[in-house]
Image (cartoon, rainbow, N blue to C red):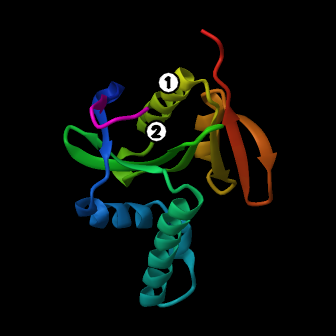
Amino acid sequence: MLDSANALADGLTIRPARSSDEPFLAALYQSARPDLQLIDADPELIESVVAQQYQTLQTGAGTAYPNAMHYVIEKTAANIGALVVDFGPNEVRVIYLAFIPNARGLGFGRTVLQGVQQAARQVRCPVAAVVWRSNPRARQHYIALGFQVEEAGDTAERLVWYPTAA
């Protein structure tokens, strides 16, 4: 599994999130949801909707996946992203993966996902993720890492990667 001493390629490290990370995590969520900024409303209402959606993510992950692990991704000791992952009995589920704007498109997501795949391979479990149709770049990254579409809906797809025997 991923642990606090987990060093990845590209100089990335993953550590368990702490309560002191909350302001960073909330700001990261807001930056990762540009779709919510398009709401035709006053800024206070938009801010309220973003906060509500962030709380829904936190509560939903805790309810559906009570053992989910929340991580902060760092590069040279600076917070650049977040990962929420659940190591369930039948699959490893990537619940949330996001990076600050300056860290997007640099391959860090691929590095983190490869680390999740490596951990899943050790326990011989598939890795699953839900990707919004409004995020085709994320979908491309998952497909490039060997994920396959298992379910397709109007707004999202469930992608799964199966480990191969080594």
Q: Which residue is nearer to you in this view: 33 or 102?
A: 33
Percent coordinates x, y for residue 153 in the rendering = 80, 55
- The residue to which callout 2 is attached is 109
Q: Which residue is nearer to you in this view: 66 or 110?
A: 66
**Residue at the spot x=60%, y=24% of the render?**
124
Please tell me whether residue 64 is drawn above or below residue 77 in the rendered image.
below
Lateral position of residue 17 relative to residue 57, left or right = left
Q: Which residues are magenta?
A: 1-6
**Residue at the spot x=42%, y=67% of the render?**
30
Residue type of the residue flagged with mark 2: Gly
In this rendering, the label closer to the viewer, 2 or 1: 1
Percent coordinates x, y for residue 154 in the rendering = 80, 59
SS class, disc 2: helix
Percent coordinates x, y for residue 117 in the rendering = 53, 28
Percent coordinates x, y for residue 67 in the rendering = 49, 51
Please tell me whether residue 137 is drawn above or below residue 21 in the rendered image.
above
Residue 140 is a magenta residue = no
Instruction: Pick whichever of labels 2 and 1 is earlier in the sequence.
Output: 2
Q: Give the quarter of the image for residue 156.
A: bottom right
Looking at this rendering, what residue extends furthest in the left direction? 77
Badge number at residue 118: 1
**Which quadrant does the C terminus fall into?**
top right
